[in-house]
Image: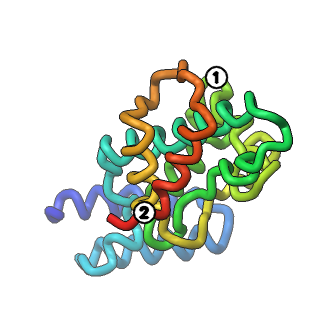
Amino acid sequence: MSPIERTLLVNQFQLLLATAEEEHDRHEYERAIAIFENGWEYLYDDVLASPAMPREDGVLTLSILQMYRCLQLSVSHFNHEHDLADRVFFPGFDGNQEARFRAFANWYCRPGGNERFGLFQDLEVLEPGTTIGDLGESLDLNSHSPRLDSYRRMLAELGDVKPDNLLFGQLSDSGVRAVLDAAYLDD
């Protein structure tokens, strides 16, 4: 980061400090000022926003959500006592190793985020019977264990799911089972 960029950031944080009402905010702004005034690069990431999420990761996140929507819609057309009903909820992303996917999914699906047309409001998440709409602002799609590899295998089994394609054909019982079972296959 150039000295000019650091100076601009210092000036921005000084403006924020001058208008801060909360002691916690004042402390954070003073800390940021010290970091950039002194050029402590090691601490820049503590203050600056996360690096941009690559477009392909955003597409993957939405494809995974769409896949679970497709699985749930398919199962909803089966017998109500169907044994797959408790297996098609979306477990989320790991909060440690898949944090950017989790953060994007949380934001995208949260009311007031970018969630379009209420597409995922009825998506069952974290446990059977709990929907995104039920969770509202307290939505946190944390699976507490890594899932991306499983999701990629499931997507490969399902085919290339496009996040903007709102119309899906219905999967059969065996199709839903094949997608779910792909999660447990070895790479």
Residue 3 seen in the figure: yes
| First along the sequence among labels 1 and 2 | 1
**Tally of marks:** 2
Q: Nearer the viewer, mark 1 or mark 2?
A: 2
Picture quarter with the N terminus: bottom left
Judge left or right: residue 145 versus residue 4.
right
Numbered disc 1: secondary structure: loop
Q: Mark number for residue 23? A: none
Q: Quadrant of residue 144?
A: bottom right
Q: Quadrant of the C terminus?
A: bottom left
| Front-lying residue, 157 or 95 | 157
Element marked by disc 2: loop
Q: Would you say 51 lies left or right of 102 here?
A: left
Residue at image location 50% in from the left, 58% down from the top: 16
In the figure, 37 relative to 19: above or below? below
Residue that mark 1 sits on:
117
Q: How is the image coloured?
A: rainbow
Q: Residue furthest front?
A: 174
In the picture of the structure, the residue carrying the numbered disc 2 is 185
Query: Residue 132 location in percent, x, y?
Result: 72, 44
Please provide percent x and percent y for residue 52: 32, 51
Task: Using the image, determine if residue 117 lies above or below residue 40.
Answer: above
